[in-house]
Amino acid sequence: MSELADTARPVIRRGLKLQWEQPQNAYVLLYPEGQLLLNQSAAEILKRCDGVRTVADIIADIERTHSLSGIGPDVTAFVALALEQRWVEVHA
Amino acid sequence: MNAAPPSAALTPRLPLWLLLELTYRCPLHCVFCYNPTEFAKTGAELATADWIRVLREARALGSVQLGLSGGEPLVREDLETLVAEAHALGYYINLITSGVGMTAARIAALKAAGLDHIQLSFQDSTRVMNDFLSSTRTFELKEKVAELIRSHGYPMVLNVVLHRLNIDHVGEILDMAERMGAEYVELANTQYYGWAWLNRAQLMPSRAQLERAEEVTRRFRARLGNRMKIYFVVPDYFETRPKPCMNGLGSVFLALAPDGTAMPCHAARMLPGLTLPNVREQSVREIWYDSPAFNRFRGEAWMKEPCRSCPERGKDFGGCRCQAYLLTGDPDNADPVCELSPHHHLVTEAVMRAEQAAAAEGEGTPAAPLVFRDHRVSIPVVVATENAARR
């Protein structure tokens, strides 16, 4: 898995779409001819991958919103996975 | 019917994936087209208002993945209107196109309307083969369309249908894709339905060709990695287990033909004894949940042996119903691609005959004339067993 800096600004890849689907009662990530059904933590992270927030911002924002702490490594690992799976990209 | 296993498997899920075949009209005449060989005899296309009603009804049931296909969907002058409506409803919209009919003005309008994704098909890497296989002169035009797709910020996604006449060009095809800046390339080996079924003997590659193509693909993957993702879809006939076709019919996929006929898979029109409902007469809800056609292959009660007691039946659902029908004459049989099927020899024999034909042929010269997709020709479906009986 590639190194992921806290300062990286991940963004949902072009051609993909993240949205809430009431009939499935979940966030889904849509791509041609398929979808990824997201659990709550994956959705909380991907919702914040807007190309503006850094990984550090995303961690801080989720911790603040949900009164959590120490989730940094998990978030970073998930964003790295999302990068590898080409759900998100990082602009230099 | 009382022997059927209770509830769970029979409760339909949501029709997440909606495919609209907006028209059977197409400027190309591809020999491997899966459209029905009798498409010329089908009824009039739905009007814009009908398609919009279908989009609304399906979305209310949970459809979210929308494929716009055909024929060539760009032939429909209301494509932009339909895309705008679908976008407003919250669909993810994928246009499946040959590119013929795409212009700078149209792609800009489609983008503005909310089109999410474009999948462009190529028949080959060379103008001569592309134009021969589609019986048109479209190669340069497609290259221009690829440029339009890129310049409008869409990922460049190519689909190339492979078969005996072009599979040896996989290296050139992937070179072309790389030059075009493709992010995804789908090398989809021909599936034998529709026009491809008619041309099966001429299109089936040999095992040696297939292995060479896979080797070339591996080399490209090793060199390009994530920069250009390559999907290599192995032809069914070379497998020993069937594909989980449509995740089971009536599970997640709903296709509509140009005349409004609703189908649990895009080839289902050929299945005997299946009275397909039409959106002109019934709501999408009635069609999905209540119609006999969509319930016909739900659950496992319809299965025969060896599927019925097979530990893998929940994984592949017995494979493809259309393939079972075309090859054995009975859509309830196991897909003969499966080596556990008593009909598996029909598949291995077809491959063997293709091997022999390929060996006998001079390079690129088909043994028998290919049948090009044509609206002036209407050819009834003939299953393999009838074919064999006639000989």
Image: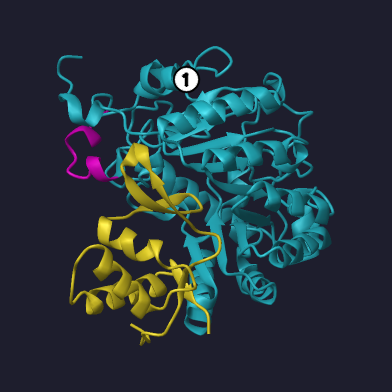
Closer to the camera in the image, A85 or B163? A85
* Viewer-nearest residue: A35 or A54: A54
Residue B150 position in % (x across, y down): 69, 66
Corner quadrant of residue B164: bottom right
Left or right: residue B387 compared with residue B70:
left
Q: Is residue B310 left or right of residue B280?
A: left
Check the image and report above or below for B259 versus B205: above
Q: Which chain is cyan?
A: B
Residue B205 appears at what percent x and percent y?
A: 55, 57
All told, the count of numbered labels is 1
State the residue at coordinates (62%, 31%).
Answer: B36
- Quarter assignment of residue A69: bottom left
Quarter that holds the N terminus of chain B = top left
Magenta span covers which residues? B303-315
In the figure, the yellow chain has which letter?
A
User: Does the image show residue A22?
Assistant: yes
The chain containing the residue under callout 1 comes to B
The residue at 45%/78% (across/down) is: A9
Please, is residue B48 above or below residue A57 in the view? above
Element type at mark 1: loop
Q: Is residue B238 left or right of residue B200?
A: left
Residue B299 image position (x, y, % from top left): 26, 29
Q: Which residue bears the numbered disc 1?
A: B272
- Asked whether residue B312 is drawn in magenta, I would say yes
Q: Quadrant of the C terminus of chain B?
A: top right
In the figure, A33 relative to B156: above or below?
above
Observer able to see residue B72: no
- Above or below, B302 against B24 in this view is above
- Quadrant in which residue A63 is drawn: bottom left
**For mark 1, does the 10 Å Cα neighbourhood hold few (<14), some (14 to 19), or many (20 or more) residues?**
few
Q: What type is the residue that disc 1 sits on?
A: Pro
On the image, the x and y values in percent for residue A10 come to 44, 74
